[in-house]
Amino acid sequence: MPTENNSNSLSAFETLESKVRSYSRSFPVVFRKAAGALLEDEKGSVYIDFLSGAGVLNYGHNNPDLLHGAIQYLQSNGIVHGLDMATSAKREFMEQFDAIILRPRGLTYKFQFPGPTGANAVEAALKLARKTTGRHTVISFTNGFHGVSLGALAVTGNRYYRDAAGLPPAGVVFMPYDGYCGADQDTSKYLDSVLSDASSGVDLPAAIILETVQGEGGINSASSDWLQSVERLCRKNGILLIVDDIQAGCGRTGSFFSFDFAGLSPDIVVLSKSLSGVGLPLSLLLLKPELDVWQPGEHNGTFRGNNLALVTATAALQKYWTDEKLSQGVLEKGRIISERLRQIAQSSPNSLLSVRGRGMMLGLDCSTGKLAEKIVRKAFEDGLVVERCGAEDQVIKLLPPLTIDGETLQRGLDILDISVHEISKMTP
């Protein structure tokens, strides 16, 4: 335990840890405990968590039912690391995922366990699309974010991350996302024109990759009509559709997959973040069986299929996805948050505030990054952990645990409400 004099001291982090750290700058305390939607620092101060590990902790911190299975598994000498060997934990996860998530939706996929990060799963998806089609170009969208390893970075739009690569990302063409050119412009028609015109300068791509709700890009939510139009374009042109459901999936928008509401059947689905249920690293590629053209070990890694994470992931499926209770709760809480955000925006002295998002993946657009930064800083001082996103970090992104209780949710929204109004009054 830290001594009183050392409580919340960041000196060791400032001295020993790389400058690349980011969240510890936004929330400059030393956290030591967490449960549900609450974080506690070394001084015993408690914070309401609307960050949820950037979408990793959909079921809250240290969910006791999920951890119970993990503890039992460890105590029984269950396999923790097994490369990609067959294990009991992996078999149970795949069978349960197929039975609980895929078959009720009429979906048939092969499972690929890449390295445990979302970016590695994106890398695998892009490689597989190129290998399957024999084509090289990939289409991504404005404000898309898919990771910062070189392949994933190439399909990521943000210049801040792209500039850190050290060489120009290649092999990708960016197209305008839904709403990018204004609410009255259907950008899928432009995409159709480009793909249909042999002189557009855009080569027929191997794949189109998209998020149905752009997380880091600013909580931009695509309509079902737009998503269905993009899927039709893929089918018409023999292009693979990759849905990156790393942040928007695992129930964040209400249903397990964020594309369920549009009735999509992607060729490849990328999952990570909340898949393990408790924050253990785990990622998964779902691919249509005819796309499984890998040779053994072509996309490998030492930590494929984290078995302890598979145990907790299976527990999450069994606890939360065998009925509609969680999904309905997400939609109801999403309506509560969305309505409260609209009230905050309408009553704020700043008339430029607006609300965006879907389910419990919502954002308050503050128009400028400077205003959003001040509001987030004030909210943290008052006991709320919440982050920013968007091209200029101008959107306050709300990702509370899906399991948050109503009282804690309201307390968090109260803190945000007060912070918005206090800072808006002081900021011209």
Image (cartoon, rainbow, N blue to C red):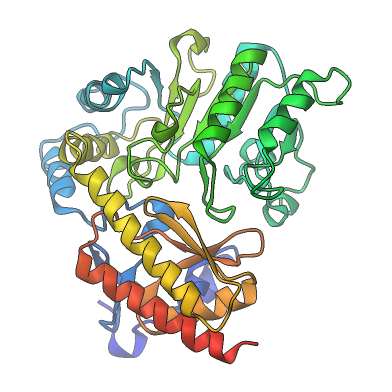
- How far from the left and from the top, in percent, is residue 26? 50, 73
Q: Quadrant of residue 140?
A: top right
Compared to residue 401, the image places residue 128 above or below, namely above
The residue sitting at 67% across, 46% down in the picture is 184
Q: Is residue 231 left or right of residue 66?
A: right
The residue sitting at 65% across, 72% down in the picture is 368
Compared to residue 362, the image places residue 289 above or below, namely above
- How far from the left and from the top, in percent, is residue 168? 79, 42
Q: Is residue 371 left or right of residue 315?
A: right
The residue sitting at 34% across, 84% down in the picture is 7
- How far from the left and from the top, in percent, is residue 407? 20, 70
Q: Nearer the viewer, residue 10 or 117?
A: 117
Compared to residue 342, the image places residue 66 above or below, namely above
The residue sitting at 83% across, 20% down in the picture is 197
Residue at the far right in the pictured view: 199
Q: Is residue 372 left or right of residue 201?
A: left
